[in-house]
Image (tube, grey):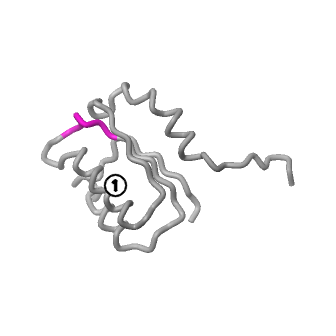
């Protein structure tokens, strides 16, 4: 209830410390007032813990199923690639698109 915006880059929604259960939890839990931006690379990891692109697609499907305000973007980058950095300004603009500056207006 304290956080309303999530920025996930290369989300580890695989079998790593329970990350693989998050898409299921989202589907089974009442929707929260959270806006979610997801970014992953098409060439991300595929190892014994899982396939990162596939896991992020599962997360996207869960968010869509529960009617969350979300956006999923893809790059050609690899896991944790610096090539994702150019996406940050647009990701932040999208997450904060309806923010109103109320500082000093009380």
Q: Secondary structure at mark 1?
A: helix
Measuring 33% from the left and 28% from the top, which residue is drawn there? 81
Q: Quadrant of the C terminus?
A: bottom right
Judging depth in this view, the residue of 47 and 67 nearest the camera is 67
Kindly give the residue lying farthest to the left in the view shown.
48
For the stretch drawn in magenta, the main secondary structure is loop
Left or right: where 13 falls relative to 101: left
- Magenta range is 40-45
Mark 1 neighbour density, 10 Å: few (under 14) some (14–19) many (20 or more) = some
Give the residue pinned by disc 1. Answer: 60
Judging depth in this view, the residue of 21 and 105 nearest the camera is 105
Residue 44 part of the magenta segment? yes
Relative image position of residue 47 (x, y in whole percent) = 14, 43
Say above or below: 90 vs 34.
Answer: above
Relative image position of residue 24 (x, y in whole percent) = 30, 66
Left or right: where 80 falls relative to 96: left
Relative image position of residue 63 (x, y in whole percent) = 38, 60
């Amino acid at each position: 209830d304290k956080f309303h915006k999530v920025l996930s880059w290369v989300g580890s929604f695989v079998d790593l410390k329970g990350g693989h259960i998050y898409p299921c939890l989202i589907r089974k839990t009442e929707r929260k007032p959270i806006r979610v931006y997801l970014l992953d690379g098409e060439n991300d990891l595929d190892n014994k813990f899982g396939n990162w692109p596939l896991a992020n697609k599962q997360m996207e499907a869960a968010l869509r199923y529960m009617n969350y305000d979300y956006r999923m973007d893809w790059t050609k980058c690899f896991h944790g690639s610096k090539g994702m950095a150019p996406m940050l300004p647009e990701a932040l603009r999208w997450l904060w698109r309806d923010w109103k500056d109320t500082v000093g207006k009380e």
